[in-house]
Image (cartoon, helix red, strand yellow):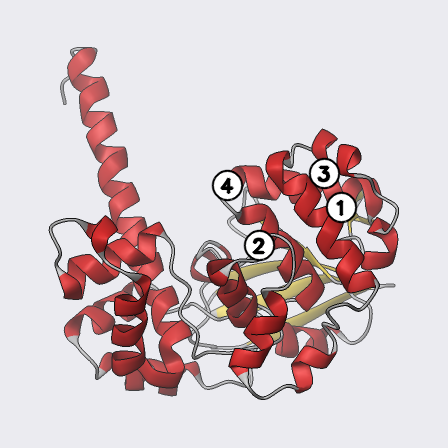
Amino acid sequence: MKEQKYVLENYDSFNLKDIFECGQCFRWNKEDDGSYTGVFKNNVLNVKSENKNIIFEGICQGDIKEIVVYYFDLERDYKQIKTKLSEIDNNMKQSINYGEGIRILNQDLWETIISFIISANNNIPRIKGIIEKLSKKYGNKIIWRNKEYYTFPTPKQLKDVSVEEYRNLGLGFRDIRLFETTKMIKQKQVDIEKLHNEKDTGKVREELLKLSGVGPKVADCILLFSTLKRFEVFPIDVWVRRVMNDLYIKSEDENKVSKKQILNLANEKYGNLAGIAQQYLFYWRREIRLKVLYFNRLKIFYIQNNITF
């Protein structure tokens, strides 16, 4: 594979931080110059924003333009989507203004399944670390610009990995789940390739739920963030429960708000764009809360150390 370059000129609805840090992917890392480098399939790409242009450079298995257009879903009109969602209410409008550059990636289905099984009850730095160790040990090495990168291992590359070997990578209780799911997919007890041809999202979800370690939330993440591309799903985690309660339901105890109540509300308000709406809302409120927490901790630090401005 040789190095290639592709430039998107004056392209809107594409912001590096919004895309790579909204919680949908785990193999993109920020560089010192503000660009991001990631590995997907057999491709290593660096993406940077410069003078309103988006510059893609790397080594790809195929034509870089075709790969970029597909992976970043560039043929989808996000401007039209944002206009439609912004008309719903002011909360939706504000969230879109905050994360206007989000795009839902076309991530490999197999990798998305395993990645989100690993994500269960986990934090993003640890998820990324586990996936990197898994890829380095069992994936293929790619060298680009004198640096080593590793592809995500295929089912065939993981077929003989033991539960103990997974445990040694720091997977914890997820070790048996990766072992069982890999076995099920390798033996086609769940044929993930056929899932792309099934139009009924409910039936696809039923198949995904057969996999070890895949519950309703993980299944919906797989449906939304992979090449399955089911925008009508609405993954619910602690952040989404919180934002939906804060903005709409307003229960004194957010833990008493049922998933059914949230899903009914999401379906009513956002319809077949619920998944994209969820990403805008989730990213907006999570980032705002994290910033508040950061400044509060900074304030306490200054007070404790008698630091004044």
Q: Which residue in the structure is indicated by mark 3?
A: 133
Q: What residue is shown at x 66% (from left), y 47% (from top)? A: 177
Q: Are marks 4 and 2 in contact (CB under 8 Å)?
A: no
Q: Which mark is residue 135?
A: 1
Q: Are marks 1 and 3 in contact (CB under 8 Å)?
A: yes
Query: Which image quarter holds the C terminus?
Result: top left
| Front one among 129 and 51 | 129
Q: Which residue in the structure is indicated by mark 4?
A: 122
Amino acid bearing label 4: Asn
- Which is closer to the viewer, label 2 or label 1? 2
Q: Position of residue 123 (x, y in %)?
A: 48, 40
Amino acid bearing label 2: Phe
Query: Which image quarter holds the N terminus?
Result: bottom right
Task: Identify the image quadrant of residue 169.
Answer: top right
Q: Is residue 87 left or right of residue 272?
A: left
Q: Which residue in the structure is indicated by mark 2?
A: 116
Q: Earlier in the sequence, mark 2 or mark 1?
A: 2
Q: Earlier in the sequence, mark 3 or mark 4?
A: 4
Amino acid bearing label 3: Lys
Residue 98 seen in this snapshot: yes
Separation of marks 1 and 3 at Cα, in angstroms: 5 Å
Q: Earlier in the sequence, mark 4 or mark 1?
A: 4
